[in-house]
Amino acid sequence: MLSQVQLARERIRDFICYTPCQYSADLSGITGQQIYLKLDNLQRTGAFKERGALNKILLLTEEEKRRGIVAASAGNHAQAVAYHATKRKIRAQIVMPLMTPLVKVSATRGFGADVILHGANYDEAYDEALRRSKEQSLTFLHPFNDLAVIHGQGTIGLELLEQISDLEAVVVPIGGGGLISGVAGALKESNPTIRVIGVQTERLPSMLAACKAGKPVTLPAEATIADGIAVRRAGDLTLPFVQRYVDEMVTVDEEEIASAILVLLEREKTLAEGAGAVALAALLHKKTSLTTQRTAVLVCGGNIDVSLLARIIERGLVKDGRRVRIRVHLSDRPGALHLLTKILADQQANIVETLHNRAHYGVNLGDTVIDITLEARGAAHIQTISAALHDAGYKFERIP
């Protein structure tokens, strides 16, 4: 593995960004570890996928280049293939699921590929890409189950060894397993003492399922904000590498991913998509066995739909106790709202939104109900606000 990753690095080094790996004092303080963020979201197409896709493209024969290529992807592999194929005047078709975020579809088209939207999920897009490959004699570029792609992704591991002295652990997102296979192989064959931790979304732990079964298994389709690693079936090629090189695998849920995205935005001024934030999510929520190690965290993608980002931020604020909605019953008379808002102001709770309702919720005539969205400073602050309302005699409840 190591020798092939080294060859891949020499092959792609002039065309790939040597991304920064910066120490984070804030995240180190939060986690109790020495945290370094490997920012592969800063690649030209916004994700690490360029490394593997380019390595594969550079290994194509002249005949394969002439016929053209086809790929299936939820977004990041699509953009990587589109960009590097177009730069080399290779015709590329990309089949993407119908629900792929608009930002990824637009970017893929912008990089010069022919985009075909097909299927409800990656698997259906994959089947369509294979059909086109056979029908049109196109070379299929698999996003993870390909040795050239795995070796290309592994170049991140070589960079980490140069960027972090005495590296002790690396936390890596897992979808189909291409990224962690390459990175873990490069690291373990360079220094077997480095711990490699893989992180999957709780909704689609396909690699965990494959390791338990001893072979790839197909999981039911699930929606997740970590769409970049929403892979139902681990790769036949990647599974043996994971079994050999990866020390531990954990999962994170949707709220934990949303919280990690928010932390990266606020603390590091770094934009990560769901799949790009799962590694940090695992550390923030103490999912791994790591304690005080010098740890590299892969932030491997930043291509996120703006509307999804807005919803993720909202959910993250709610989970962190910085936004709360309450439903308050009060008399429908002049000054009643003023008294309520004075209590909230005294508690330094900022009102974001209000909604009066006199006709619903079973309120008595002469009474009203008001839904109030508040900005707070955390769970303790919310408890203080609740206590103040209770002491003032208000009937209220939190709204999920």
Image (cartoon, rainbow, N blue to C red):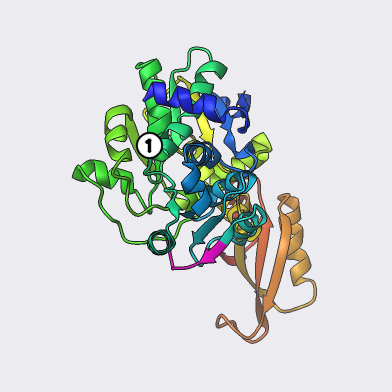
Which is more toward the observer, 193 or 337? 193
- Residue type pointed to by label 1: Leu
- Toward which corner of the image does residue 372 lie, by quadrant? bottom right
- Toward which corner of the image does residue 264 lie, by quadrant? top right
Whole-percent x and y of residue 253?
Answer: 43, 49
Q: Is residue 342 above or below residue 61?
A: below
Query: In the shown orientation, is residue 285 left or right of residue 362?
Result: left
Bin the neighbour count of mark 1 within 10 Å (Cα to Cα): few under 14, some 14-19, many 20 and up.
Answer: many
In the image, residue 120 lies in the stretch drawn in magenta = yes
Q: Regarding mark 1 in the picture, which secondary structure is present there?
A: helix
Which is more toward the observer, 25 or 111? 111
Determine if residue 31 is in view.
no
Whole-percent x and y of residue 153?
Answer: 47, 34
- Please identify the quadrant where the N terminus is shown: top left
Which is more toward the observer, 284 or 37? 37
Q: Is residue 13 above or below residue 337?
A: above
Q: Which residue is mark 1?
A: 147
Whole-percent x and y of residue 399?
Answer: 55, 65
Magenta-highlighted residues = 115-121
Q: Residue at x 32, y 27 (%)?
A: 245
- Toward which corner of the image does residue 260 lie, by quadrant? top right
Q: Residue at x 69, y 76 (%)?
A: 356
